[in-house]
Amino acid sequence: MEVLTVTLNPALDREIIIPYFEPNRLHRVFERDKMSLSPGGKGINVSVILSDWGIDSAATGFLGGNIGRMIEQEILSRYRNITTSFVHIDEESRENIAILDDHNHTLTEINEAGPTIEEQDLAHFLKVFSSLVDHPRVVLIAGSVPYGIPLDLYPKLTKIAHEKDTEVYLEARGILLTHSVSTYCADVVRPDLRSDTRVFGKEVETMADYIEAGEKIVEKGAKLVVSSYQVVNDLVFTKDGVWLLSLADPRVDPSHLLGAGDTYMAAMIYHSRKYGTDLLERAKFGMAAALAKTKYLFKKSPTIQEVEESLPKIQTKQIKG
């Protein structure tokens, strides 16, 4: 396997298309093609996209109960390029619901918190991770964490991977992000600012705030930091400078954004394995993939051809360095 993905809080993702969605009223969905059920959680989503692009990966984390068994069965039955090494726990894994309104162009997400992880399960997971990390060239650690997971787990996993000379990608938010990059920083970091816009304890609002936060993560040891800015732009940080990536046509349907961030991460990994080490080009390829994904309403991987066709639509401007 080339890639190991870590999803500590997997989910069964239920996507429903409801045009003219409104709260406080009954909505009925009669057409089966308006509903989708799939294994989810950020790391699993990245494994799925990489599988569609011909990249082998192993997926690990925690799965529990009937939902957990269903998630694993769906992965193994649908995706031949993914192997699984999950730690199974007693509590049920979570279910997430996404309501896609393609008329009002809105995306409403309802995410459960997930199970509680016991100390013995965490110890078991660390043994599993340590045995798996001998093989891949890339480890992706992404997403929320369930109850019972200590703040130092992400940096601990990063350190174990680095000791095996393995590149680490991290996507996290809030205090988990800040603690992880401050304690033992991953190589490629994508702050998740959707529901928590604090980085290093400070609200990130203006471009100056974004630049300060991104440069600080680079100072902590990241080779590449990519941060979404005003939804349709990205700020890219390396030791050589700061760039703004923007779209030639910034019109993107918000109801089509589900899974775009995971597509971005998967595409950066794909680029690093197939095309080399240029960090700015890696970020541009990620943004092109996220843009290509927005052609589709449900979670769906764009083809590599669609990603490459989107590349000319990405504009690059160096703003520091």
Image: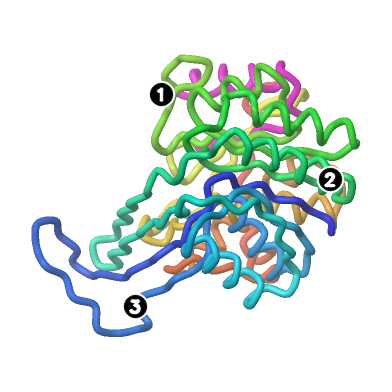
Q: Does residue 317 appear in the picture of this structure?
A: no
| Residue 142, quarter of the rendered image | top right
Which residue in the structure is indicated by mark 1?
A: 205
Q: 10 Å neighbourhood of mark 1: few (<14), some, or many (≥20)?
A: few
Q: Is residue 190 left or right of residue 132?
A: left
Q: Which percent across, then down, holds residue 60?
A: 68, 52
Given contact means CB atoms under 8 Å apart, are the residues at marks 3 and 2 in contact?
no
For the point 41% across and 19% down, the residue is: 203
User: Between residues 258 and 154, which one lies in front from this camera angle?
Assistant: 154
Look at label 1 and name its amino acid: Glu
**Secondary structure at numbered mark 3:** helix
266 part of magenta stretch: no
User: Reading the chain from its start, which is encountered first: label 3 or label 2?
Assistant: 3
User: Reading the chain from its start, which is encountered first: label 2 or label 1?
Assistant: 2
Q: Does residue 115 appear in the picture of this structure?
A: yes
Q: Which percent across, then down, holds residue 273?
A: 84, 54
Locate the N terminus by quadrant: bottom right
Using the numbered discs, state the Cα–Cα distance from disc 3 to disc 2 in whole angstroms. 41 Å
Q: Which percent across, then down, holds residue 309?
A: 65, 66
224 part of magenta stretch: yes
Q: Which percent across, then down, holds residue 198?
A: 45, 22
Which residue in the structure is indicated by mark 3?
A: 34
Which residue in the structure is indicated by mark 2?
A: 131
Most extreme residue toward the left is 25
Q: Which residues are magenta?
A: 205-228
User: Between residues 213 and 166, which one lies in front from this camera angle?
Assistant: 166
Check the image and report above or below for 142 versus 306: above
User: Between residues 178 and 245, which one lies in front from this camera angle?
Assistant: 178
